Amino acid sequence: MDYPIRLADQLKAHLRSLRKLRGLTQAQLGQRLGIGQVRIAEIEARPGLVSVDQLVKLLSALGAGLVVRDLEGRSASPATEPALERASSAPPRASRKKAVVVAGKAPSRAQGLRIPAKKGSW
């Protein structure tokens, strides 16, 4: 199922819901990512301050992913289209939209996933 996100603040409820749907506490999710429960609480409270890389890692640990969809129905330029097709497992061109959405089911790669502690980039 897709969850359209137009504001970073909308991620709060979706991240929390995905975590609870997976039956994880903040501490358990933090353990999967190599960070503490307090950091997970901070991310859920203010997801707009997290980098895209960190958000993708968090979503992956939750068995979710990030999708970009073209809402205007325009396709990429012919020169970049084949590269985009090879680089992603995106849906066919006709159904691609240009908005970030959080998708519910994606292959979980949480096993080897490590997110650094808050110092530095977090």
Image (spheres, rainbow, N blue to C red):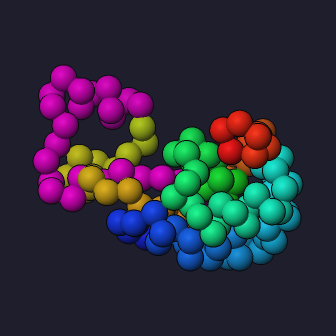
Query: Would residue 4 be seen by someone viewing this image from the given angle?
Result: yes
The residue lying at 76 percent from left, 40 percent from top is: 119
Query: Does residue 111 appear in the picture of this structure?
Result: no
Q: 98 or 54, which lies in front?
A: 54
Q: Quadrant of residue 121?
A: top right
Counting the numbered discs, the total is 0
Q: Which of 15 and 38 is in front in this view?
A: 38
Residue 7 in the image: x percent, y percent? 39, 66
Residue at x 56%, y 76% (from the top left corner)? 13
What is the x, y in percent for residue 72? 15, 56
How far from the left and from the top, in percent, is residue 114?
77, 40
Magenta stretch contains residue 53 = no
Q: Residue furthest front?
A: 119
Above or below residue 27? Residue 110 is above
Residue numbers of the magenta segment? 63-87
Residue nearest the observer in this picture, 106 or 102: 102
Identify which residue, 50 or 80, lies in the foreground: 50
Residue 56 is situated, as x and y percent measured from the top left of the image, at 57, 48
Asked if residue 66 lies left or right of residue 55, the reply is left
Q: Does the magenta stretch include residue 79?
A: yes
Picture quarter with the C terminus:
top right
User: Taking 27 as reference, is 13 above or below it?
Assistant: below
Left or right, 16 with reference to 48 = right
Q: What residue occupies the far top of the structure in this picture?
A: 79
